Image (cartoon, rainbow, N blue to C red):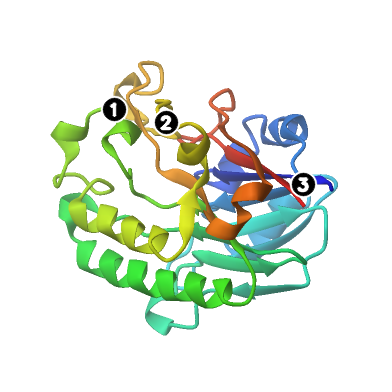
Amino acid sequence: MSELHLVSWNVNGIRAILKKDFIENVQAMNADIICLQETKAQPEDVKTALATVPDYQFYTNSSKARKGYSGTAILTRKAPIDVTYDMGVEEHDQEGRVITAEFDEFYLVTVYTPNSGDGLKRLDYRQDWDETFKDHITALDEKKPVIVCGDLNVAHEEIDIARPKANYNKSAGYTQQEIDGLDNLLAEGFFDSFRELHPEEIKYSWWNYRFQARERNVGWRIDYFLLSERLKDQLGSAEIYNEYHGSDHCPVAVKMKF
């Protein structure tokens, strides 16, 4: 049995974070697989940036509809069996938000879930997205277990957000509709790895750049590793790496035993 260390990090711009000790942080984490969200660059720019990260092969998905927006990537030391992009639904496949990599024991899906936007103007779209993404994940789970990681853009419970009452049903990422979307996915046979192992720990993965939110730890936990229920025995640890900076998000991680 060997240990597999997986990390997920919304980098808020791959070119920007490269100037902020990103390579040193990647080397310090020493993960087997690193999933990135919000790369904010076109394919050639992402490839140029990731080519400077030693020891990993990488796969990228960029926004087709809007340059410098959204985007995901997977860096891995072990070659996957197969890699696919998006979800096969044109409406949701324009912004480079999903990559699926198949390995021997599991599927790995990294996702940058759409934000519902200022004034919740994109909430209806977000609900459609959540349903489509759930269908994508459950179809994979019928074949082999799934590890989902990324910025899901929702604080699931009150413990996951510093100011729940002030934000509930007012702020994108903490509406009942978004919470229901995550509940519906978990109900299909998945669990939140961090909350499984740390049921009462208050720890956040995102802080607004304004108001010195990170210094005051006024944050949200919106970055996750969700696992198929049948991977529960393989889960060794689930952590939030608050010590790494460079983005308004910090990395989250699991260690699995296969």
| Coordinates of residue 226 in the picture (x, y in percent) | 51, 52
In space, the residues marked 2 and 3 are separated at their CA atoms by 23 Å
| Residue holding disc 3 | 32
| Coordinates of residue 258 in the picture (x, y in percent) | 77, 52
Q: Is mark 1 on a helix, strand or loop?
A: loop
* Picture quadrant where residue 146 is located: bottom right
| Frontmost residue, 3 versus 48 | 3
Q: Residue furthest top?
A: 216
| Frontmost residue, 5 versus 114 | 5
Query: At 32% from the left edge and 55% from the top edge, which residue is drawn?
Result: 115
* Picture quadrant where residue 102 is located: bottom right
Query: Is disc 2 surrounded by few (<14), some (14 to 19) or many (20+) residues within 10 Å?
Result: many
In space, the residues marked 1 and 2 are separated at their CA atoms by 8 Å
Q: Is mark 2 on a helix, strand or loop?
A: loop
| Residue holding disc 2 | 204
Query: Decide: marks 1, 3 in contact (CB < 8 A)?
Result: no
Residue 209 visible to the viewer: yes
| Frontmost residue, 161 versus 35 | 161
Query: Decide: marks 1, 2 in contact (CB < 8 A)?
Result: yes
Q: Which of marks 1 and 3 is nearer the N terminus?
A: 3
Amino acid type indicated by mark 2: Tyr
| Residue holding disc 1 | 162
Amino acid type indicated by mark 1: Ala
Query: At 35% from the left edge and 56% from the top edge, which residue is drawn?
Result: 182
Left or right for 38, reference 119: right
Left or right for 258, reference 19: right
Q: Earlier in the sequence, mark 2 or mark 3?
A: 3
